Image (spheres, rainbow, N blue to C red):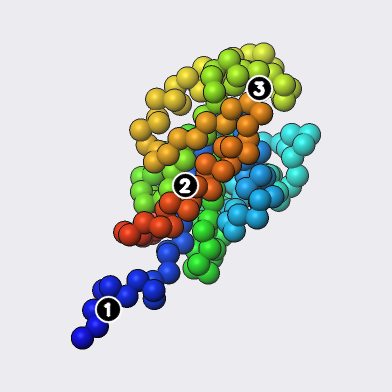
Amino acid sequence: MKNSSCNIFSVSPRPLLIVLSGCSGVGKDTALDKLKESGCPLRHVITITTRPPRPNEVQGIHYHFISEDTFQEMKGNNELLEWAQVYGKWYGVPREPIRQAMAQGHDTIIKVDIQGAATIKKKVPQAVFIFLLPASMDELGQRLSRRKTETLSEMALRLELADEEMKQLHLFDYVVYNKEGEIDAAVNQIKAIITAEKSRVRQREIILG
C-alpha cells in the first residue's frame, strides 16, 4: 500500500512572502533592481508614499507617489498591510497586490523600512525577513552623502536612527551584508536564501493579516 505522505513528487513549494529591509541608504532599491535584472522570478509589490520622488526615481517602479489624502483614504479602507510615518512622510504597503500574486503561486517581495518590517512581523510572522546591512556605519554615511538627497542635519538624523534600527536585528530571519562595490554578492545571498526556503521540508504557510 502506498503511503501518500511520502509522495514528495506531487508537492509544490508554497509561495513565499519576502520582506527586504534595512537602514536608509543601505542599497535596498539597488538590490531589488539587480534581482529583477538577474531574472529572479519574484513579484515585487511597490510601496506607496507621500514623499516627492528623488531625481532618479520613477513613478510605479521605485514607489507609487500619491497625495496624503489618497494615502489616508487607503489607510481608512484597510487597504494597507502596514503603514508608517518616516521623516514626516507616509509609507505603506498595499495589501491586494500581495494577495493576488500569492494566490497565483508567485513568490512576492516587498521593501520596507525597519518600522514597517516590525509591523509585518506581527501580522505575518511566517514571512521571510531579510535585513540588509552595510559593511560599517562609516560606509553607510558615505553612501548617504553621495546620493545628495539629504541635508547634513537629515543625514545625521538618519545615521542616528540607523544605530537604533540595528537593535531590531532579532526580528529578522537572515542578515545580508551589502558591502561597497559587492552588490552582486549580496544579491546572490538573497537568491540563496530563497532557494533554501523553497527547499524546506516544512514549508512556511503565509496568512496575510
Q: Pointer 1: residues within 10 angstroms few (<14), some, or many (20+)? A: few
Q: What numbered label is drawn on residue 193?
A: 2
Where residue 170 sits, quadrant-wise, is: top left
**Lower position in the chain sequence, tag 1 or tag 2:** 1
Foreground mark, 2 or 3, reads 2
Residues at circles 1 and 2 in contact by the CB criterion of under 8 Å: no
Which residue lies most toward the left here?
1
Q: Mark on residue 188?
A: none
Instruction: Classify residue 54 by image quadrant.
Output: top right
Tag 3 secondary structure: helix
Relative to 71, is 178 above or below?
above
Measured Cα–Cα span from mark 2 to mark 3: 27 Å
- Are the residues flagged by discs 2 and 3 in contact, CB closer than 8 Å? no
Q: Position of residue 89 (x, y in %)?
A: 60, 34
**Residue at left offset 71%, top offset 36%:** 52
Residue placed under numbered mark 1 in the picture: 4
| Three-letter residue code for mark 1 | Ser
Which image quarter: residue 158? top right
Q: Please state which of residues 165 and 154 is positioned toward the viewer in this rendering.
A: 165
Reply above or below: 129 against 163.
Answer: below
Q: Nearer the viewer, residue 108 or 4?
A: 4
Q: Position of residue 6 (x, y in %)?
A: 28, 73
| Crowd rating for badge 3 (residues with CA inside 10 Å; few <14, some 14–19, many 20+) | many
- Label 1 vs label 3: CA separation? 55 Å
User: In this rendering, would 30 be left or right of 123?
Assistant: right
In the rendered structure, the answer to whether residue 71 lies left or right of residue 114 reads right
Task: Work out which quarter of the rendered image holds the C terminus and state it.
Answer: bottom left
